[in-house]
Amino acid sequence: MELFNIHIADITYHFTSNKEDLTANGFTYTAIPISRTEITRGLDDNGLKITAPLIVPPFNTMLLKTVTTLSRIEVLSYPDLYTLYKGEILKTVLDYDKEIITIYVAQNIIIKNNEFPIRSYSPTCGDNFGDRYCSINKASHTFTLHSSDFTLDSSGTLINADTLSTKNYLKGGFVIANNKYYSYIMEHNSQQITLLNPIPKPNIITEFNITPTCDKSLEACNYYNNLDHFGGFPYIPDNNIVTGGF
């Protein structure tokens, strides 16, 4: 049996692969069907995959791909509490049919070795919405639609709601239906959004949590009241001054 500490921003979740809850280091570790692959140890590969039930927090609110919030996982043996592995979450893959999430984890040194230390200069921001350089808390801009607020078509891809006409920067954001089903937003036109992936079982959906994004423009940064963290250079000429002139 093993213990899993999952750190999402400033919150830590404690789980165990044991059949019953355990207490260690002053924390209660909740028993869930969580498992991991064999830990690989090499110069170019030093990671593992963790599988857990999709309906258990925080797994039910993890993104479809790379997690932008700083997220770490520790795996400890029990009862000696030896640290078997520490790493950062690279991405998550959801299986709605089996209702499980697979988390890909790698150690920080491997991640850094695969990053190129470059700095781009463009009118738009080079940071990602909600990452540590942007500093915006995406949760504070997330809003909820209840069953009386929206309609969802039978294909599970079109959401209509009056509230949507008052929102900005939804295209490229994502939705979570019933705290379980995820999809990215392809289009936003007034009171309607179009989803990239159909929401399963649209007739039972009673709630949507919708998180906007950012188009990396100075105007968007101003909209989020985050100009102090704008990472772009808005006064760089759009045209190449060598080939196109001033």
Image (cartoon, rainbow, N blue to C red):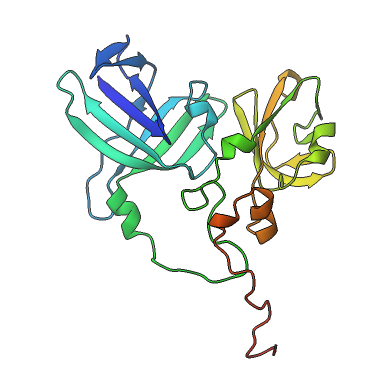
Is 91 located above or below residue 73 in the figure? below
Q: Nearer the viewer, residue 44 or 20?
A: 20
Q: Nearer the viewer, residue 204 or 146?
A: 146
Q: Residue furthest top?
A: 20
Please report the residue visible at 28 percent of the width from the left and 23 percent of the height from the top: 3
Please report the residue visible at 32 percent of the width from the left and 28 percent of the height from the top: 5
Q: Position of residue 210 (x, y in %)?
A: 67, 34
Quarter where residue 148 is shown: top right
Quarter where residue 195 is shown: top right
> Could you tell whether 210 is left or right of 54 in the image?
right
Q: Position of residue 10 (x, y in %)?
A: 41, 33
> Could you tell whether 122 is left or right of 147 in the image?
left
Quadrant containing the C terminus in the rendered view: bottom right
Please report the residue visible at 51 percent of the width from the left and 34 percent of the height from the top: 62
Please report the residue visible at 30 percent of the width from the left and 43 percent of the height from the top: 47
Quadrant containing the N terminus in the rendered view: top left
> Could you tell whether 6 is left or right of 81 in the image?
right
Is 74 located above or below residue 218 in the figure? above
Q: Position of residue 115 (x, y in %)?
A: 38, 60
Q: Position of residue 165 (x, y in %)?
A: 83, 40
Quarter where residue 9 is shown: top left
Q: Nearer the viewer, residue 29 or 197?
A: 29
